[in-house]
Image: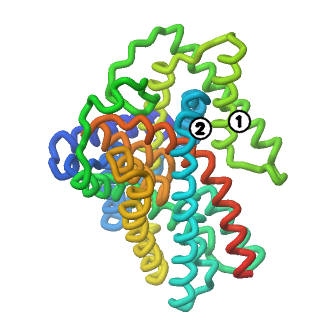
Amino acid sequence: MLQLDFYGTLVAASLVLLLGKFLLAKTPLLRTYTIPEPVAGGLLVALALLGAHEVLDVQVRFDTGLQTPLMLAFFASIGLNADLASLRSGGRKLAIFLLVVIGLLLLQNTLGVALASALGLSPLFGLLAGSITLSGGHGTGAAWSAVFSQDYGLANTRELAIACATFGLVLGGLIGGPVANRLMKRVSPPGTEHDADVPPTAFEQPQAVRLITTESFIETLSLIALCLLGGNYLAALCKGTALELPTFVCVLFVGVLLRNGLSMLGWYSVFDRAVSVLGNVSLSLFLAIALMSLRLWELTGLALPIVLILTAQTVAMAVYASVVTFRVMGSNYDAAVLAAGHCGFGLGATPTAIANMQAVTSRFGPSHIAFLIVPMVGAFFIDLVNAIIIKLFVAILG
């Protein structure tokens, strides 16, 4: 057992990002299918650690204490970047995309329940391999696995939920690029001039040089810290009530209030370039730590029926993004970027969705509308509607 401390883990995460950048520069196949740098580097390290575990019986453990603060800082930057005036301009598209997302949630649970029943499993296992862990992620999976274990007597639900969510995180980062690449053959990539007259969002151009000052950096860091403090307090306040929400949603909400409240009062204008730098750093390091610390050997313990369900869910996600998401959102370049993002949080998480879209737009040109609506839908609205849909399915099956 090799245990890396906080500093060792931070060094390893930084090296993973550099490795990902090197792999994309030297591997045309990865560039062709627009695989994000953190995904390429992180998965290579995870596979190497899988080999060390299986062949040499060596296990490396990372200090993941930095992972949650980085994730929350990323969601804080989404909130601080959410100008309500801009959101109103994309309101119709946002509403349509939310309906598309709801359609996928229903499909994931229907497919999971149907396949679980056909394979002789409890249909609740199908829900665990549905929107609970795929669109919901590790947190939602852990919460509902406890419910299924305590109230319905199902065994090994926690381990299954973690494995399913891990499977989704990996595949969400792998299929988004290929799906977008295939869709690009049906549209005309606009190039760098697309949306050139519209100010980019914080995550839209991660490779761009940002001119910021020490003062603006510290001010923005203070705002992010306030979001984390206020979000954690709000989450604790709502815990156990009908308004209970994941901490990252509360952090994002506080960020929206801070940005727009301070602007309306005329006290302070959030410096978007500093938000961009801090948000992208948090996103990249979070993904690097999350992917390099994946315990891929736990996926080998999945029973064959669950593997079949998850494989079917992955195919369904790719088809749904290519057919439904792409067509409903306009069958254009922006729709292709949205499809890549939908693959990211439809199987994995919002950070994966952003990374997928960044990989596409860095190659083909910016997409303002995609970066406007995906963070809000993937980080905020999806948790609300997913909770309602899960409860509906559980009530029907119960």
Q: CA distance from mark 1 to mark 2?
A: 9 Å
- Residue 72, numbered circle: 2
Secondary structure beneath dot 1 equals helix
Residue at 50% of width from left, 45% of height from top?
A: 374
- Residue 231, numbered circle: 1
Percent x, y of residue 392: 71, 71
Q: Are marks 1 and 2 in contact (CB under 8 Å)?
A: yes
Residue at 69% of width from left, 28% of height from top?
A: 257
Q: Tell me if residue 385 comes above or below residue 364 in the rendering.
A: below
Picture quarter containing residue 333? Answer: top left
Secondary structure beneath dot 2 equals helix
Q: Tell me if residue 397 comes above or below residue 265 in the rendering.
A: below
Percent x, y of residue 272: 50, 21
Residue 2 left/right relative to 141: left
Could you tell which of marks 1 and 2 lies nearer the N-terminus? Answer: 2
Please, what is the three-letter code of the amino acid marked with disc 2?
Leu
Q: Is residue 233 visible?
A: yes
Q: Nearer the viewer, residue 142 or 136?
A: 136
Percent x, y of residue 16: 34, 41
- Few, some or many residues within 10 Å of mark 1 (<14, 14–19, 20+): many
Please, what is the three-letter code of the amino acid marked with disc 1?
Gly
Q: Is residue 1 visible?
A: no
